Amino acid sequence: MTKKNKYGHLQRFGPATRNSLVGLKAACKYELAFRQEVFLCLILLPAALYISDSFVEFALLMSGIMGIMITELLNSAVEAAIDRIGPEHHELSGRAKDLGSAAVFVAICYFILIWGYKIYSMF
């Protein structure tokens, strides 16, 4: 038997938003990499506005930054869940953490590709 959700479709928006803000606060408090990426975003957002020729180009540049941040949040969630299970080394736990790290690496490669092409095309 499943537990009935106490919120309707629109009523769920408020609690979901609060939970998301709690998660962002936790990421800022406990995750150095996420804080560095927020700093990068604050620096590169105005740069993207300045160097982009259209909204689509701006959105592409920002997708590189946001992709890193989204992936870092998911990686941090995986790491927290694995750490909760226990401190002993397990092959699957290590693989899960490595896969999360690989996802962040791929997001960084995407960022470098997008921003690198834009910077290259300016010169």
Image (cartoon, grey):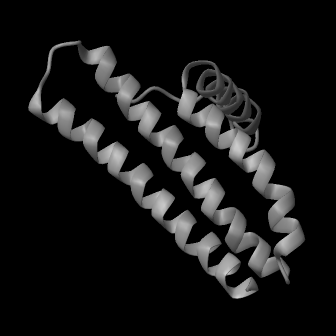
Left/right placement of residue 32 relative to residue 16 reads left
* Above-or-below relation of 43 to 95: below
- Where does the image place residue 23, in percent across and percent down from the top left? 61, 27
From the viewer's side, name the closer residue of 3 and 51: 51
Left/right placement of residue 15 relative to residue 23 reads right
Going 83% across and 62% down the picture, which residue do you hit? 47
* Above-or-below relation of 103 to 112: above
- Where does the image place residue 57, in percent across and percent down from the top left? 75, 79
Quadrant assignment for the N terminus? top left
The image quarter containing residue 39 is top right
- Where does the image place residue 62, in percent across and percent down from the top left? 71, 63
* Above-or-below relation of 60 to 92: below
Q: Farthest residue to the top: give it.
A: 87
The image quarter containing residue 117 is bottom right
- Where does the image place residue 4, in percent across and percent down from the top left? 51, 29
Going 82% across and 77% down the picture, which residue do you hit? 52
From the viewer's side, name the closer residue of 85 and 48: 48
Q: Farthest residue to the left: give it.
A: 91
Going 41% across and 54% down the picture, which residue do you hit? 105
